[in-house]
Each structure stands twice: as structure tokens, then as C-alpha cells.
Image (cartoon, rainbow, N blue to C red):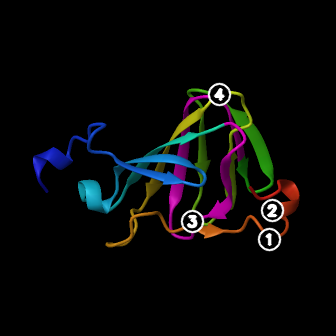
């Protein structure tokens, strides 16, 4: 691994606009060569979010940097603010919504990293399935 991949500056982060928000990929196999960690900073506008989904092979931390996150883990919901964290075990359904009035910024750390060639973490959307769609309507 080259040294420049050990320090990921803003200009080296891979930006990707996804329907759920602007992603700044800071670490994944194609950026840092990491085999065990994926790290992404996500910016979510008010009223948007990442609907119910699960990562069959990955654990995840969601750490709120700024704004307000309506964080669901299975059927439990908490509102998280700056400096607060949610831990999602492997294959557990969860969702993150911005129900505040300002942009939500959070850091997501997932492990292990995706398989070589995969750039986005292994994810299964369940937002249109019951009971998830009855807890919160899909975006």
C-alpha cells in the first residue's frame, strides 16, 4: 500500500451523490486497501434518509457529527445528536432519517470491508416489506 493512501484528505475522498445523501467515501478497499473497515461521511438533507435496510455480512457504527438523526434499530427508535452513536450488529435491520431542520452529517464505519471490486457495502433494502414500511413509509 502506498503512503498517500494512509492519509485521506478531502480531495482524495470519493464523492458520490446517492438518493439518500451525499457520501464522502474515506476508506474502502479501492481507496485505502482496507480489508476490514469501510468509513464514509454522509450528508443528509432535512426530510431525507436511508430507509430500512440490513448488511448481512457487516457490523456498523453510526456516529452523528452534526444535526439530528432519527435512528431506527429494528423496531426501536431514538433521536441522536452530535457526539452520539448507534451500533448495528450484522444483519440487523436499521434506518437513519433526518427529521431535523438542518443538514445531518454522520460517519458510518462498517466491518468487514466489501469484497474486492465492490465499492458500496453489502446492503439489502427492506423498506417496502412489513413490518418496516408500516413503521415509516419508504422515501
- Report the residue marked by disc 4: 102
Residue 106 in picture, x, y percent from top left: 53, 38
Q: Nearer the viewer, mark 2 or mark 4?
A: 4
Label 3 residue SS = loop
Q: Is residue 47 above or below residue 139?
A: above
Residue 92 in view: no
Circles 2 and 3: CB distance less than 8 Å?
A: no
Using the numbered discs, state the Cα–Cα distance from disc 4 to disc 1 in whole angstroms: 29 Å
First reached walking from the N terminus: tag 2 or tag 3:
3
Q: Residue at the spot x=83%, y=56% of the render? A: 137
Q: What is the crowding at mark 1: few (fewer than 14 residues within 10 Å), some, or many (at least 20)? A: few
Using the numbered discs, state the Cα–Cα distance from disc 2 to disc 4 in whole angstroms: 25 Å
- Report the residue marked by disc 1: 129
Residue 113 in view: yes
Region in magenta:
46-71
First reached walking from the N terminus: tag 4 or tag 1:
4
- Report the residue marked by disc 2: 132
Label 4 residue SS = loop
Q: Is residue 137 above or below residue 105?
A: below
Q: Is residue 121 left or right of residue 81?
A: left
Q: Residue at the spot x=57%, y=70% of the render? A: 56
First reached walking from the N terminus: tag 4 or tag 3:
3
Using the numbered discs, state the Cα–Cα distance from disc 3 to disc 1 in whole angstroms: 16 Å
- Report the residue marked by disc 3: 55
Viewer-nearest residue: 139 or 53 = 139
Q: What is the crowding at mark 2: few (fewer than 14 residues within 10 Å), some, or many (at least 20)? A: many
Q: Residue at the spot x=79%, y=71% of the render? A: 129
Circles 1 and 2: CB distance less than 8 Å?
A: yes
Q: Is residue 88 left or right of residue 101?
A: left
Using the numbered discs, state the Cα–Cα distance from disc 2 to disc 3 in whole angstroms: 15 Å
Amino acid at each position: 500500500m502506498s503512503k498517500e493512501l494512509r492519509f485521506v484528505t478531502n480531495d482524495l475522498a470519493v464523492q458520490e451523490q446517492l438518493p439518500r445523501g451525499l457520501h464522502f467515501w474515506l476508506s474502502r478497499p479501492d481507496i485505502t486497501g482496507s480489508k476490514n473497515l469501510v468509513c464514509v461521511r454522509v450528508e443528509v438533507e432535512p426530510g431525507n434518509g436511508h430507509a430500512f435496510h440490513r448488511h448481512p455480512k457487516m457490523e456498523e457504527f453510526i456516529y452523528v457529527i452534526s444535526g439530528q438523526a432519527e435512528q431506527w434499530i429494528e423496531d426501536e427508535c431514538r433521536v441522536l445528536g452530535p457526539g452520539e452513536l448507534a451500533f448495528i450488529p450484522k444483519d440487523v435491520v436499521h434506518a437513519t432519517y433526518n427529521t431535523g431542520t438542518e443538514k445531518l452529517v454522520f460517519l458510518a464505519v462498517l466491518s468487514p470491508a466489501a469484497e474486492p471490486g465492490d465499492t458500496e457495502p453489502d446492503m439489502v433494502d427492506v423498506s417496502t416489506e412489513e413490518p418496516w414500511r408500516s413503521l415509516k413509509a419508504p422515501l
